[in-house]
Amino acid sequence: MPRRVTERPPRRRPERAASFAPSSEALTVAIRAAGLRRTAPRVAVLRFMAAASSPVSHGELVEALGEAFDRVTVYRNLLDLVAAGLVSRTDLGDHVWRYELRRIAGAHASAHPHFLCVDCGTVACLQGVTVELAPSRKLPRAVVQRAVEVQIKGRCDDCVK
């Protein structure tokens, strides 16, 4: 029986949320409080991530920042921001690291599940959604200590149409 081949819709760019735009001063305070030097690439990365409505990949971030900073500079700054605890890094099962703000007031909640569309690759933060785990003796220690990430996969509204 021949395999059915379907075309994937083009991957959408991350949307920017209009509701949160941190000042340069707020970003500087957050960067220095994390023990890092304030640099133009770090401020640009955090500013973009604060305005993004979903986690972004390194490639999406490089494309969004344009030619202001090279790929390696952006990547090294992402690693520094992750190590400092300002940004979280997540693989949603598609082998692409995605990054989002963790600790700047007014930005994303620190822990929330994500939805990944298996057709087009769109990622959405599920703010306000909680997942409760029933207590069990057989749960791994990481689950008991709440050191887990919840990922929900399926087809987004656009792909279901």
Image (cartoon, rainbow, N blue to C red):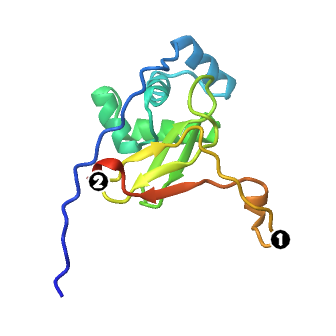
Mark 2 is on which residue type? Cys
Other-residue count near label 1 (Cα within 10 Å), few / some / many at <14 / 14–19 / ≥20: few
User: Front-most of 111 and 1?
Assistant: 1
Q: State left or right for residue 122 relative to residue 80.
A: left
Q: Mark 2 points at which residue?
A: 159
Q: Give the x, y percent position of residue 68.
A: 32, 26
Classify mark 2: helix, strand or loop: helix
Judging depth in this view, the residue of 116 and 134 nearest the camera is 134
Question: Which of the 4 image quadrants contains residue 72?
Answer: top left
Picture residue at 27% right of the left edge, 48% below the top: 11
Tell me where residue 40 appears, x and y as whole percent: 45, 21
Q: Tell which tag, 2 or 1, sits nearer the viewer.
A: 2
Location of residue 133 with respect to 14 vertically, above or below = below
Count neighbours of disc 2 (C-alpha within 10 A) and say few if under 14, some if 14 to 19, many if 20 or more. some
| Image coordinates for residue 70, horizontal then vertical, percent | 34, 35
For label 1, the residue is: 137
**Residue sticking out furthest to the bottom:** 1
Dot 1: element: loop
Looking at the image, is mark 2 or mark 1 earlier in the sequence? 1
**Residue appearing at x 39%, y 28% in the figure:** 16
Instruction: Report x, y in % for residue 30.
Output: 63, 22
Q: Which amino acid does label 1 sit on?
A: Arg
